[in-house]
Image: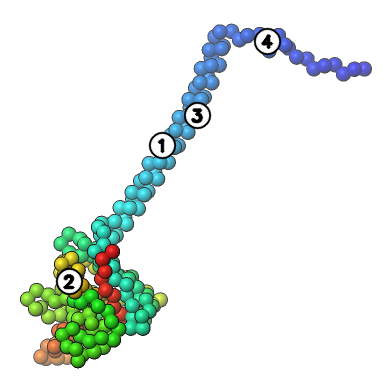
Amino acid sequence: MPTPAPYTNTSALSRPLPPGRLRLVALSLGAVLALSACANGDGADTATPEGDATSQSNGTTSEATQGGSAPLGTAALAGVDGGSVGEVRVVPTDGGVQIDADVENLEPGFYGFHVHQVGECEAESAAPDDPSDTGAFLSAGSHIPGEGGADHPGHAGDLPTLLVNEDGSGSMTVITDRLDESLLMDDDGSAIMIHADPDNFANIPERYASEGPDEDTTATGDAGDRLACGVIEAP
């Protein structure tokens, strides 16, 4: 017996919708499309400002960390053997400069950290004021002096002691109003110096020296030999 063909109500398919239902379908379809477009538009609009806000936030944080200005200069630090010891970045601030130091490849401990008055870092060299005095990085001269010939730690180039961690790295940020572009970027330049020993800042209690700190201490803070040096160079 032949299988009967499926029933199809062709009259229902071909019969036009009443005007009221036609308008309802059109309105419903329009509403769905509008909602879909709004959802897509909102997603795009929301994503863009969030991305911008993130970038601006990152930029603001970076600028704040870096002092909010272009750097005056950077110094690539190297040891006597020429090996890299890190980098120092100098950024102008209101009334002074910010110094950001990132060091590596050093033994753990504290190190004297200063700005010297000549931008020359020759591993074996003579002191500018005494050619007979030779040694590591003596070409960089002394600390940038303070006003009125002040002794250490009153030099403009005197900075806090640098701490190196157990992994041989260290970082420090310091803002000082003793330094500015005219001192750092003058005709003979300037240099960042890391010394081999901690800086005592000429703090010698009377029970150790009743006459107070001697000339060497008031000149260098007994920070020892010059371990690493970097000329501050304009970007």
Given residues 158 and 202, the one toward you in this image is 158
Judged from the image, the secondary structure of the residue bearing numbered disc 2 is loop
C-beta proximity under 8 Å, tags 1 and 3: no
**Which x, y percent locates residue 58?**
35, 53
C-beta proximity under 8 Å, tags 2 and 1: no
User: Dot 1 corresponds to which residue?
Assistant: 45
Q: CA distance from mark 4 to mark 1?
A: 44 Å
Q: Which residue is depicted at the point 17% across and 88% down?
A: 130
User: Closer to the N terminus: mark 4 or mark 1?
Assistant: 4
Judged from the image, the secondary structure of the residue bearing numbered disc 4 is helix
Q: CA distance from mark 1 to mark 3?
A: 14 Å
Q: CA distance from mark 3 to mark 2?
A: 67 Å
Residue 11: image quadrant is top right
C-beta proximity under 8 Å, tags 2 and 4: no
User: Dot 2 corresponds to which residue?
Assistant: 187
Residue 182: image quadrant is bottom left
User: Closer to the N terminus: mark 2 or mark 4?
Assistant: 4
Q: CA distance from mark 3 to mark 4?
A: 31 Å
- As drawn, 131 above or below 3: below
Judged from the image, the secondary structure of the residue bearing numbered disc 1 is helix
Q: CA distance from mark 2 to mark 1?
A: 54 Å
Q: Which mark is residue 36?
A: 3
- As drawn, 115 above or below 32: below
User: Closer to the N terminus: mark 2 or mark 1?
Assistant: 1
Q: Which residue is depicted at the point 36% across and 80% down?
A: 82
Q: Amino acid at mark 3?
A: Ser
